[in-house]
Image: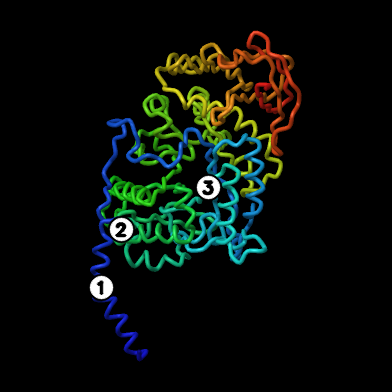
Amino acid sequence: MNPIKKYLSCWIYYFLLLPGITKAQQPEWKNISGAYYDWAKTGKPETPYAHKYEKTLVMHLMLATPDGKGGSNVRRTFEEVFKLVKEVDAITHKIPKIIYLVGWQYNGHDDLYPAWHEVNNALKRPQDSSGQQSLIWLYNECKNYNTTISVHVNMADAYNNSPLWDTYWKEGIIAREKNGEPLKIGAYNGLDAYQISFKQEWEKGYSTKRIDELILLLPFLKEAKTVLLDAYFSRENQYLNIPQQEEEIYQRRVIRFFRTKGIDVVQESFSRLREGKDHFIGLSPWFVWFDQIESGFMKVPASIATGGGPFLFLKQFPTLAAEQMQLGFLFGMSTRGEDCFNDLEDDFRTITNWHDAFKEQFFTGTLPYVYLNQYKRERLEGNGLQRVAYYNDGLLSSLKDSVISHKGFILREGNNVFVPVIWSQKREIIAYSSRGYISKTWKLPENWSKVKAVNLFQIDEKGIHFLNKEKIENRTIRLTLKEKQAILILPKS
């Protein structure tokens, strides 16, 4: 065919059929509801979550930040992430894990939003042609270590150096002050960040376009079935008279659009739960900082909404973090790992000797957390440091004496833990001590009544290593642990 005729015929086809194509596509996203979801009416999430977050170690990990010179300050390459994943899997004794990568795009964290079109090539393996190829390799390899790799993205922020800035400004997607100036919400990497109007982005088709492009770039997300939206906060668009509550309608639509792809949306949560605001409970299953209040823990089960503990904020917000740590003891709190792997007060400097800090947070945080999350919270008695949380089946967590017990079986005394491994198909117990102890007696669970001897294994970043065997008398075992030592206890066959 003549090239000119071919060119014209393509454009005729485009203009004649595009309206029909667009109309056919509309039901996928245009008609998605933004209505509030009241999970309490059903006691369930709106649609089943893809993961059991209450029984999973969920973390995020900093990889890189822009260096201000057009390059990337690399904290961990994809190969180095793989090494870390293998060591974490060994320490955690193969608990299911999800890790959201931060700084995977362009030159790193908070770079060039709202664009998501390129994987950070500074993170790639030498033998791969692109960062994208290396990231897909990482996802597939980590599956062998009980780890789902996903990504941390931002739908709320925009920078004027982004390749999408001109389009978003022209289309009115950047929220504005009443005087027409763009709504500034912070400054990162030396650049001002501006708020995106969720309503405008959705109505003009750019929200779904961004999401579709992300999945096209990282097709493994459909298998990972989860993504983290950072700082997913809405604000009033005074210029167009769009209140915050209306913006939230479109946030719900975004979450539900991800769900049409089979992908859960997890989020950061900063003060919204404490302030009693809707934070999409029953739509989002997990929150980076689960700043839930006491009554919220009693009302909302972990299977509906849960999240990370306040370890990260112990220095920045000591009073608030102290209360959250107390609630975490009563109801469970899981480590997010990020402050173990990177120094958040020193420009995300990589911490190479992270193992002891991580073990402390995992064994005193996540291990009791997944155990408590199996049971129903029934009542809370006392105030302050005298509080005791009662669960069904005789499980209780007592803040006043720092004890968690189940039918008289002690799982925790202070930072000494003795907790069954619920994610294992076998009878296994993990014992850990922050400070160590000599000749401490622990009672074994009822289903160990016929066990006469056990094998003890050291747990560390290299796996498990046989230590010795111990006799069992009257369903009790006597242990001696070193500081920050974890051991695995198995019935001797």
Indicate left or right for 197 with 418 as reference.
left
- Horizontal side of 223 relative to 198 (left or right) equals right
- Which residue sits at x=72%, y=29%? 458
Q: Which mark is residue 17?
A: 1
Using the rendered view, name the quadrant where residue 298 is placed: top left
Locate the C terminus by quadrant: top right
Residue 256, above or below 279: below
Mark 1 nearby-residue class (10 Å; few <14, some 14–19, many ≥20): few
Q: Quick one: SS at disc 1?
A: helix
Q: Is residue 237 left or right of residue 396?
A: left
- Name the mark on residue 216: none
Residue 19: % across, % down? 24, 69
Q: Which residue is mark 2?
A: 200
Q: Earlier in the sequence, mark 1 or mark 3?
A: 1
- Looking at the picture, the colour scheme in use is rainbow
Question: Helix, strand or loop at disc 2?
Answer: helix
Q: CA distance from mark 3 to mark 2?
A: 28 Å
**Labels 2 and 1: the sequence-earlier one:** 1
Instruction: Name the residue type under label 2.
Output: Gln
Q: Amino acid at mark 1?
A: Leu
Amino acid type indicated by mark 3: Tyr
Residue 102 coordinates in the image, percent (x, y): 54, 51
Crowd around label 3: few <14 · some 14–19 · many ≥20 (10 Å): many
51 vs 250: above or below? above
Above or below 163: residue 375: above
**Label 3, on which residue?**
100
Task: Residue at the far bottom: name it.
Answer: 2
